[in-house]
Image (tube, helix red, strand yellow):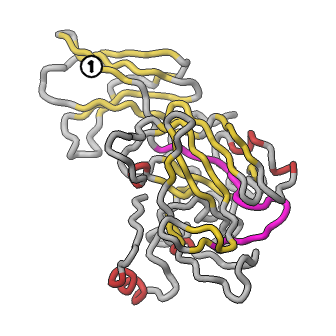
Amino acid sequence: MSIRLLQTGFMAILAIACLDTDAGPYSPPAGTDGSEAIHMNSELITGWAIGWTNYQIGARANPEWQILTNALGKADGTSFDIVSLGAGGSITMLFDPPITDGPGPDFAIFENAFNHAFLELAFVEVSTDGTNFHRFPSHSLTPDPDPDPGSPFVSIDASDLAGLAGTFVQGFGTPFDIADIPLPPACNLTQVRWVRLIDIIGDGLTLDSLGNKIFDPTPTEGSAGFDLDAIGVIHFDLTTALTADRSGVRVWFDAPTNRMYHVEFTSDLTQPDQWTVISEFIYGDNASHSMIHANPFAGAGTYRIVVNFIPSP
């Protein structure tokens, strides 16, 4: 997903309004034309969070919704296999291998919304060191639900939201592209090992990146606030290296467990469907693996490591 916050954008908004007076400028709900929602079974997803830290439980979350292992592994896509943050709570999820910035979205966050309008939202932040976090820019165009702001019955439209987790119904993830985070030139986010979620109390007192009020259903009880199902990874960063001699190009890489890997090669990056597999599947065993590609002097080429997540039994 590419977030472009509309600070003025009158003409763009007007053009959309001519098509649908109720729709905002961002991704429509899951399952509708043009939606950026990613299904939990999408082939784009190559892995899932492996751990957590700094679970800060907020208000009005019962113990049965605080089972942290529920946020690990593949999304369940139901209302029950979740970790509640509670009102104003937060959690940091861990990834190994780390997430990297590839083309398009890099990971997707799954909540347990039971319909397209009851959307509980959270800020999303990422870190490469577990200490310094960078927040995705966010935008909320949800109108003030006057005369009852903060009602748990407020209706939220996904197309009014950008850069916030929880914008789609259960089973569908909100995608995030690391490239959307504004960073100083000396900073890069090629190895994101931590993703932090911070529940938004949607009574209008919390503001988005442009100073707009954020509304979502509040107050709620029992499993208040954002309910995390899972975080799916689209682009992993693998430790890789290349060396070349007259026998060929040697490609080596680290292979963490619970995943399968293979190496692919192309001589033409303008042809995205012309990657050639040059290795058998390698089953991750937390060791380094290497293989030889025997044609190193036939012109320039590009190698990539493809990761496939192995679901738990």
Q: Closer to the camera, 185 or 111?
A: 185
Against 256, residue 100 (above or below) is: below
The residue depicted at 70 percent of the width and 81 percent of the height is 149
Residue 225: percent from left, percent from top: 73, 61
Q: Which residues are magenta?
A: 215-234
In magenta segment, residue 117: no
**Which residue sits at x=69%, y=44%?**
71
Q: Is residue 135 above or below residue 17?
A: above
Label count reads 1
Q: Nearer the viewer, residue 193 or 33?
A: 193
Expressed as whole percent of the image width and height from the top left, the position of residue 18 reads 40, 89
Residue denoted by label 1: 293
Mark 1: amino acid = His
- Residue 183's place in the image compared with 282, above or below, is below
Answer left or right for 272 relative to 67: left
Choose between 212 and 38: the one closer to the eye: 212
Magenta span dominant secondary structure: loop
Tell me residue 56's x, y (percent): 74, 46
Q: Looking at the image, which residue is at 35% across and 48% down?
A: 103
| Quarter of the rendering occupied by the C terminus | top right
Q: Is residue 43 visible to the viewer in this orientation of the structure?
A: no
> Position of 301 compared to 258: left or right?
left
Q: Is residue 170 left or right of residue 274?
A: right
The quarter of the rendered structure image containing the N terminus is bottom left
Question: Front-most of 84 and 58?
Answer: 58
Quarter of the image where one finds residue 250: top left
- For image coordinates 52% across by 85% down, the residue present is 22
Residue 220 part of the magenta segment: yes
Element under disc 1? strand
